[in-house]
Image (tube, helix red, strand yellow):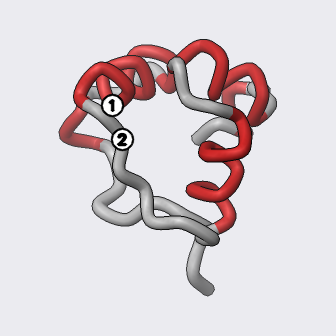
Amino acid sequence: MRDRLGLTQEELSRRCGIPLRTYVRWETGEATPRPTIPQIKALCRELKIPIEELPDEFGPLKA
């Protein structure tokens, strides 16, 4: 979703109030995401999607 909008990991993490290292670890699957409600709302706003459309799992796409 982030790539489709042309956002870097740094841009999205900053806009959502998520430390860059934390965001990168979530996206790569190195850490289990535990975003706060404000972070979830910010992710939805920045990714331009309703909360219902967020994936159930975060991390790298599984082939």
| Residue at image point 72% right, 44% down | 21
Q: Is residue 28 left or right of residue 50?
A: right
19 above or below 45?
Answer: below
| Residue at image point 29% right, 61% down | 56
9 above or below 56?
Answer: above
Q: Is residue 5 left or right of residue 39?
A: right
What's under tag 1, amino acid-wise?
Ile
Labels 2 and 1: the sequence-earlier one: 2
Extreme left residue here?
A: 52
Q: Residue 50 bears which disc, if any?
A: none
* Residue 5 locus on image (x, y percent): 68, 26
What's under tag 2, amino acid-wise?
Pro
Crowd around label 1: few <14 · some 14–19 · many ≥20 (10 Å):
some
Q: Quadrant of residue 38?
A: top left
- Quarter the N terminus occupies: top right
Crowd around label 2: few <14 · some 14–19 · many ≥20 (10 Å):
some
| Residue at image point 28% right, 42% down | 53
Q: Residue 35 bears which disc, if any?
A: 2
| Residue at image point 38% right, 26% down | 39
Q: Is residue 38 left or right of residue 60?
A: left
Q: Residue 40 bears which disc, if any?
A: 1
Tell me the SS state at disc 1: helix
* Residue 47 locus on image (x, y percent): 50, 25
Tell me the SS state at disc 2: loop
